[in-house]
Amino acid sequence: MTVEDYQSGQILLIDKPLHWTSFQVVNKLRWEIRQAFDIKKIKVGHAGTLDPLATGLLVLCTGKMTKQIDTFQAQIKEYTGTIVLGSTTPSFDLETEINESFPTSHLTSELIHKATKQFIGDIEQFPPVFSAIKKDGKRLYEFARAGENVEIKPRTVNISEFEITNINGLQVDFRVVCSKGTYIRSLTNDFGKALQSGAHLSALRRTKIGDFDVKNAESIESFIKILASE
């Protein structure tokens, strides 16, 4: 592709690595495109944040295609991941340490599969306190890390599919298809409560956004190699 192609607008599918923020991926690719074509600036944006501890599909738009970001963000998303039953963390994932443990002797495969049914359809969900949502000009995670309590309002999201794909002791693998704005960490926390136990997320991967599939995504390294050959 030429510099004109990137400026007129491209959709880039990137498989976000673990521990990278979505913002870091955008910055890295923007810098690489600028270096490759010796240009001062190029618009690059992403269509939907992934947490640093999540991997998978990040849809990036360049140039004039950035105007389509809201359209892509609104599309249905698919995730796979692993839930650990019997314990919770303040962030609902492994960003923070386990803070509470719960009984698990009553849990059965049948109970775990059955509990998914109550989350299908439109549900009320409280975003995690460790999230990038803004309140009074600050990110919620800023309040959380400072130990400050803050009132969070629930939001309505839609879960069209919630499938348990494997159970290995207290580790439960799943697949979820959901609407924009769904927090899988919050779903995990609520799932633990529904089982009268606790739960936290130990792995998360976004596999689809609308018709875009992570199978067609490039790693950051492979994208850089493609750029170098252009």
Image (cartoon, helix red, strand yellow):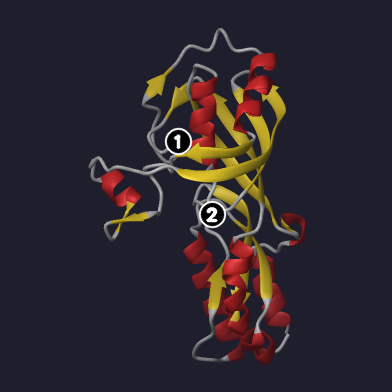
Q: Which structural element holds mark 2?
A: loop
Quarter occupied by residue 58: bottom right
Amino acid type shown at disc 2: Leu
Locate the C terminus and report the quarter of the image it occupies: bottom right
68 shown above or below 151:
below
Of 124 and 34, nearer the camera is 124
Q: Which structural element holds mark 1?
A: loop
Query: Is residue 224 rendered to the left or right of residue 45?
Result: right
Q: Residues within 10 Å of mark 2 (few under 14, many from 20)?
A: many
- The residue positioned 55% from the left and 7% from the top of the image is 105
Quarter occupied by residue 44: bottom right
Of 194 and 27, nearer the camera is 194
Which one is earlier in the sequence, the residue at label 1 or at label 2?
A: 2
Estimate the x, y position of residue 26 in percent, counting from the top left.
53, 69
Q: Which mark is residue 50?
A: 2
Estimate the x, y position of residue 27 in percent, counting from the top left.
49, 72
- The residue positioned 65% from the left and 82% from the top of the image is 9
119 shown above or below 170:
below
Q: Which mark is residue 221?
A: none
Reading the image, the residue beneath label 1 is 92
Q: Residues within 10 Å of mark 1 (few under 14, many from 20)?
A: many
Locate the N terminus and report the quarter of the image it occupies: bottom right
Amino acid type shown at disc 1: Phe
Estimate the x, y position of residue 45 in percent, counting from the top left.
54, 72
15 shown above or below 198:
below
Query: Is residue 59 rendered to the left or right of residue 229?
Result: left
Residue 200 in sight here: no
